[in-house]
Image (cartoon, grey):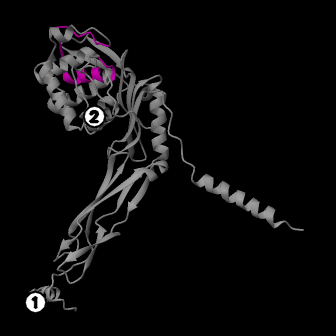
Amino acid sequence: MFCYKKLILALAAVILSLTNTSIAYAQEPVLSADAAVLMDSATGQVFFAKEPDKRRFPASLTKIMTALVALENGDPNDVVKISKKAASVSMGSVIDLRAGEEITLENLLKAALVCSANDSTVAIAEHVGGNVENFLVMMNARALSAGAVNTNYANTNGYTLPNHYTTAYDLALIARQALRNKQFNRLISIKETTLNWEGNKNRTLEIRNTNRLLREGFPGIDGVKTGSTPRAGDCLIASASRNGRRLIAVVLHSNNRYTDAANILNYGFKEIKSYQVFKKGEQVVSVPVMEGVLKEVPLITQSGLQIDITDDKISLLRKKFLFKNSVMAPVKSGQVLGEIICSLENREVGRISLVAGDDIERKSWLRRKWEKLSVSSGINN
């Protein structure tokens, strides 16, 4: 006899397996880094974060801001005369600057970003800011303008000091600002180059980029900067571009910064999808219209809203609707009457306006008077 019970159980098992397959989510990468952020360079949206707002030492990631301020306020073709102060810097990576010699700002920037030279940043600061102290004021002001409110610079190169700090999230914001600068992008993509001094053809220095991902050709890699001190640990900001998307990976105090950065970049490029939250013209709610010929006006989305998100985060998306409980006639179609703000893990990821979906005229003066009299006298229309 044919066993219907076994057939039903078999079908149920197949359906369950298909269901489980369809809702399976990719696991977020497990990192050795104490703090990390994955950010979209174009939008600033965060797709992955580990201790993003905890205060950290930035090490030579500091030099990203040093270079950005110099590029925005100086001329790379300027010839810089090296001071005794710049020449006296000897700790960590240096290019052996000597007092009185001359070198272009361009070469100093290459030294700072490609081989992470500490002495070059002091020469940069003195030339662009007049002195290091003034340049630090410029660096801190630029950090604030980038939204990096939990960052403070006390030097130009990243030496560890109690009042020299940042966060993984702030560093992603700062890198995003720097990547908008064409000259910065050119400098951080250099694998190897030769530094040349002015007035001395024999004074040259071969340097190569400290970013191993760049040297070894990680797919799409185009920057940015390494950093390392005993207190900060091994740090890296890496950017890569694939299929029209550019991502910024920040890893701080990592046991393997290159593997960590590669893992979160690969995760982002593989798992981030475009998700349509609202379509253009979608009715969201209706609100009462005071003194209107119609009692309500529909509020519709002025535009569509798509956000980039991983499947496992869609359930965490929050939508905040802002609109008045009622509006006064007349109402014009397309009139902005509210907005929707979407956030993910307490960070805004998009917003759109809510507009009136119809024209609603105001009732005539005579009709308004009659209705008031009717209400006061208890007359039913």
Q: Of circles 2 and 1, which is in front?
A: 1
Res 100 visible: no
Q: Quadrant of residue 371?
A: bottom left
Residue 366's tag is 1
Q: Is residue 112 magenta?
A: yes
- Above or below, 127 against 307 in this view is above
- What is the three-letter code of the residue carrying label 1? Leu
Percent position of residue 293, x then y: 20, 84
Q: Quadrant of the C terminus?
A: bottom left
Res 186 visible: yes
Percent position of residue 295, x then y: 25, 80
Is residue 239 rendered to the left or right of residue 353? right
Instruction: Identify the magenta region.
Output: 93-117
**Residue at the (17%, 81%) spot, across then down:** 361
Per the image, the residue denoted by label 2 is 174
Classify mark 2: helix, strand or loop.
helix
Marks 2 and 1, how far apart at CA:
62 Å
